[in-house]
Each structure stands twice: as structure tokens, then as C-alpha cells.
Amino acid sequence: MAILFTSPGDNAQDWRAALARHMPGETVRVWPDIGPREAIEFAIAWQPPPGLLASLPNLRAILSLGAGIDHLTSDPQLPRHVPLIRLIDPSLASQMSEYVVMNVLRHHRRMPDYASLQAKGRWHPLLPAPDTTKRRVGLMGFGVLGSDAAEKLKPFGFPLRAWTHRPHDLGDVQAFHGAAGLNGFLAGCDILVCLLPLTDDTRGILDARRLAVLPRGAALINAARGGHVVTPDLLAALESGQMSGATLDVTDPEPLPPDHPLWRHPRVTITPHVASATLPETAAVIMAESIRRLRAGSPVSGQVDLTRGY
Ligand code: NDP
Ligand code: OXD
């Protein structure tokens, strides 16, 4: 039996070496050189070719190379009876929190405004001085990544709020949930951070109607998926002054075409889906443990509930 590795953007040799260190004795096949399809027992995958997973008759589980699984559920032929495990890796959470803290502080301290003042050679303090206790930060999605980011934002003193699917008691983070809680949540987000999974319920969630509920001049940090934001609506909100700025790690489509208006918008900062990247060395340890537990019939952390969509 063998483990299949398939990802268009990752270095297969690095992965092969990391998997060999943590799963010695396993046969690892790298797409497209997969050998006999009936020998594939587990698939470690990011954006696999559509139909590939369905063509593996003895597949016991699919392990996502990332925290998200939309790159797998977008395949209409995904074998939905096969357990799907998303990656829960402390390294993903700490990288994401660095990105969130860095960009929350950047918007809070008006760094995009100072960059444009610098470009004009203008020495001009923007007053009043920023006060974290008056800047409300909202986390849309408070799972593994959102909750870690909140812990790392707490020492700065921002009033924090979160929006989730189900009700939760979040202590000193003000909690909102479900469709009924969305507008109340958005109305108090001076800086909105999107860390939702992309599902049928969340696709296009940040549209003109929702952006209009934010306090005037709010900033958006989207590190989840480009499909959460309706881009023409975001551009209109930036033009009207409803939004003061946006930092986008993810776009729709990806890669963003060179002539796309987001690239050159003065109030938009783009990074190319790098907020948090899967590292072979940390992820291979977690995947080896998941495979060991799957073989033993033990529960595995990160098992996706496909009826819920995340
Ligand atoms: P989790 O599954 O741990 O958390 C998801 C959160 O979203 C939960 O709080 C959940 O609510 C909430 N949620 C889901 N659906 C809804 C809904 N319909 N309405 C309201 N809240 C909802 O995911 P992670 O934190 O691990 O990851 C989040 C996403 O971040 C990934 O799916 C991926 O898209 C993105 N990501 C981006 C990366 C990048 O580099 N840009 C890197 C890694 C991930 P509840 O708590 O009630 O279940
Ligand atoms: C992920 C990602 O889902 O990198 O892990 O986007």
C-alpha cells in the first residue's frame, strides 16, 4: 500500500524527505507517478486534479495540505464517504497570528496614510493619536486560527469581538453568532479580520449590504479566501470612503491577474496567499500521527464534517 502526495505548488522532494523522516518504511508516490491506483491508501493533497481522488478504489482518508478544504470540496467527484482531515498545525496558527497582528497594527497606526504622505514629502501628524482601547477589532471566524489571533491581540488592549456559526462563551471577547448576529457584529468592527472557511454559507458574505453595516472608515483584513469578498463591492466601498483600506492575502481569482484594479488601488495592500504556509517539517509529524490513528481506528483531530462544510 502507498501514500499519494499531490500538490501543484509544493516541493515534492522536500515533502518526500519530511514524510520519510516521520513515516519510515512507507511508500510515498508523487502525482502523476502514482503507480497502481488500487495501492493508494491515503492521499495528502492540495488542489488535486479533479476526479483523481475518486479514481482511488482503496482510499482510506484524504489529508488536506492546509487548514482549508475548499480546494478539495470544489471537486464535484470528491469521494464524500472517505474521511477528510484538515490540517491543524500550531505553526499555521502562529504564522497567521503574526500576519493578523502586523496588519491590525498597521491599520490602527494608519501606516497606509503615512506611506502616501511620505510619497508626497509631507510631514503631517494624523491626529488624534491612535488609542487601542477605542479601536474595535472583529474576528469573523473564531476557530483554530481566529482564536489564536485573538489571544495575541489581547495584550494591545483592543476591544475584541467574534462572529461564529454556533453560540460560544468567549470570555472577554464579545461573542456573536449565526445570521441573526451578523449585523450586530459588523456594526462594531473598526477593523474586520476574516478567518472563515469558504462554504456555501460564507461565499460572497462580504458584499455591499454587509460592508455598509461596518462603521464608516472601517478597514478589512482578509486572510481566509478571496471568495468571501465581492470585489466590486469592496472597491465601491473604498471609493465612497465607507472603507478606509483593505489588506488582502487572498483574492478571487488567484493568482490575481496583473491588470486587476485591486493591484493598483491606493488603499489596498495585496500579499500572494502567504499569511500562513504549511511547512513540511511540522505538518509531516501531524500527518504521520493522523495516519497512525486512522489505521488504529482512533479519532483524528481535524476530521471535517462535510454536512456542515468545514
Ligand atoms: P476552523 O474550522 O477552526 O474555524 C472556522 C471558524 O469559522 C469557526 O469559528 C466557525 O464557527 C466559523 N464559521 C464557519 N462557518 C460559519 C458560518 N456560516 N457563520 C459563522 N461562522 C462560521 O478553521 P481555521 O481557523 O483553522 O481556518 C479558517 C480558514 O482560514 C480556513 O478555512 C482557510 O480558508 C483560511 N486559511 C488561510 C490561510 C492563508 O494563508 N491565507 C492559511 C490557513 C487557513 P464555530 O466555531 O461555531 O464552528
Ligand atoms: C490553508 C491555506 O488553507 O494555506 O492552509 O490557505
Image: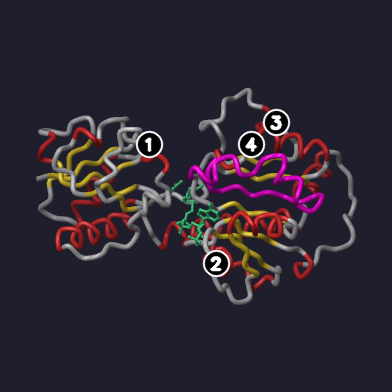
Beta carbon of the mark 2 residue lies under 8 A of ligand 1: yes
Foreground disc of the pair 4, 1: 4
Q: Residues within 10 Å of mark 1 (few under 14, many from 20)?
A: few
State which quadrant residue 192 falls in.
Answer: bottom right
**Picture quarter with the N terminus:** top left
Q: Which residue is mark 2?
A: 167
Label 2 sits on what residue type? Pro
Left or right side of 200 for 284: left
Q: Which residue is mark 4?
A: 230
Does the magenta run of residues contain 270? no
- Figure colour scheme: secondary structure
What segment is highlighted magenta in the picture?
199-226
Residue 70's spot in the image, x, y percent?
42, 42
- What distance separates the C-alpha of mark 4 from that of mark 1? 26 Å
Q: Which residue is mark 1?
A: 9
Label 3 sits on what residue type? Arg
Residue lying at 71% horizontally and 69% vertically, measured from the top left: 159
Left or right side of 57 for 213: right
Marks 1/3 in contact by CB < 8 Å: the verdict is no
- What distance separates the C-alpha of mark 1 from that of mark 2? 37 Å
Residue 68's spot in the image, x, y percent?
43, 48
